Image (cartoon, rainbow, N blue to C red):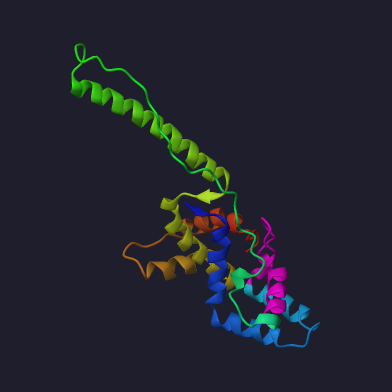
Amino acid sequence: MERTGWLRVLYLEHYDADAAFRSLLEVIASHPPGLERDPLRILAEQSGLDRLRAQDGSPSGPDLLWEWVQICRRVGPHPLWQTGWGGAVPEIDTRVKVAMEAEWRPWERSRGTARRELLGLVAAELDERLARIEQAALDAGYVRVDKATKRREHLYWLFLHVRHRMTWTAIADLISLERVNAVGTDTVRKAVERIAPSVGVDISDR
């Protein structure tokens, strides 16, 4: 599993990799203190970061940019996602302990039969304990690892839609160029609509 707080990190990494965006942000950071609010507001609107809402201790997009500029003036340029990130989730008990006490009477059951029965009991208890840990992890804000790769791709689609204002069809066409099997417009739309709330991005009127 991976922490859902990292979904926002992975999303913001696309902005860090956007040379045009980073260049404008660093130019604004070079302005005299007190003159950055309006340029940052405009940059947030143009880049789609005005859509990023405060969530789980992390600042909104506009506040994120403002905090980044303040830190940049002190320590220099740094990854955007590091600024004001509050994506930590509670730690959980991941220890797995299985204990069993049973009885085997060799004169009643063969060793093979007893082994199968006892392994079945151990497996049942193990499954129960693993399910309990998994549920605790999900409740604490983790994502199943088998979904992590797809979520990374869906975050990129979200970035294309918000940052570059690409339509669902345009994103599907772009992604399909890189694949053997084409990606449908509805697939892109549904994936982005599902993941946007987890990151805190409002796409309601995009």
Residue positioned 56% across, 65% down in the render? 9
Q: Residue at x 70, y 81 (%)?
A: 74
Residue 135 at what x, y percent from top left?
A: 51, 40
Quadrant of the frame with the C terminus: bottom right
Specify the segment rendered in magenta: 48-72
Q: Position of residue 186 (x, y in %)?
A: 48, 56
- Relative placement, left or right, of 47 versus 38 is left
Q: Is residue 61 magenta?
A: yes
Vertical side of 163 occupied by 108: above or below: above
Residue 186 lies, with reference to residue 173, above or below; the image says: above
Query: Residue lying furthest top in this view?
Result: 108
> Can the viewer see residue 166?
no
Left or right: residue 158 compared with residue 27: left
Q: Is residue 194 left or right of residue 41?
A: left
Residue sitting at x 74%, y 88%:
31
The answer to whether residue 116 is magenta is no
**Which image quarter: residue 97?**
top left
* Outermost residue, right side: 34
Residue sitting at 54 percent across and 53 percent down?
194
Residue 98 to residue 105: above or below:
below
